[in-house]
Amino acid sequence: MNIDQLFSIANSTAMLGWILLIVVPRWQCTRMIVQGAIIPILLSGLYLYLMVTHFAEMGEGGFGSLDELEILFSNKNLILLGWVHYLAFDLWVGTWEYNDAMKHGIHRLILLPCQLLTFFAGPIGLFLYITIRNIKTQKFDHENF
């Protein structure tokens, strides 16, 4: 399987997870494959595979400067590695947001913009969710997690 096929599979898998999580979060299949972590685990497995098979390619570039990062991500295999990292973690965060919102009685319609933002711009969605959650629970400390 080539790198473009892996990219397509990863994107489709993550998109399926997000659609299920946002549209039918209470459906038994959603609970099993998204909230039960099957899709995030599959994406994490792909990440592990890419890390193991392309680790040697990380010799060029690095994380110490923007110039090093640019060199590192000039490699398509490492771009995919980084992309799968985002897909896996953003979906995991979206799942956590849903479960946490249900625990704290935050309505799904209030959660929806948070999840959409988490899907499109992970940290902004998480920031919005945590802000809403803290206002709802009136707790602004780290013990709230």
Image (cartoon, rainbow, N blue to C red):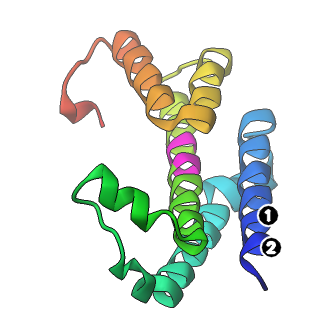
Q: Is residue 91 magenta?
A: yes
Residue visible at 71% across and 64% down? 10
Q: Position of residue 101 (x, y in %)?
A: 52, 29
Q: Secondary structure at mark 2?
A: helix
Instruction: Using the image as rendered, state which of residue 98 and residue 61 is in the foreground.
Output: 61
Residue wearing tag 2: 5
**Which quadrant: the N terminus?**
bottom right
Vertical arrangement, residue 120 with respect to residue 6, above or below: above
Task: Name the mark on residue 8.
Answer: 1
Q: Is residue 140 magenta?
A: no
Vertical arrangement, residue 89 with respect to residue 121, above or below: below
Report whether 122 appears left or right of 131: right
Q: Which residues are magenta?
A: 90-94
- Amino acid type, callout 1: Ser
Task: Name the mark on residue 41.
Answer: none
Instruction: Using the image as rendered, state which of residue 76 and residue 13 is in the foreground.
Output: 76
Q: Position of residue 24 (x, y in %)?
A: 80, 38
Q: Secondary structure at mark 1?
A: helix
Whole-Å distance between the Cαs marked 2 and 1?
5 Å
Residue visible at 57% across and 58% down? 83
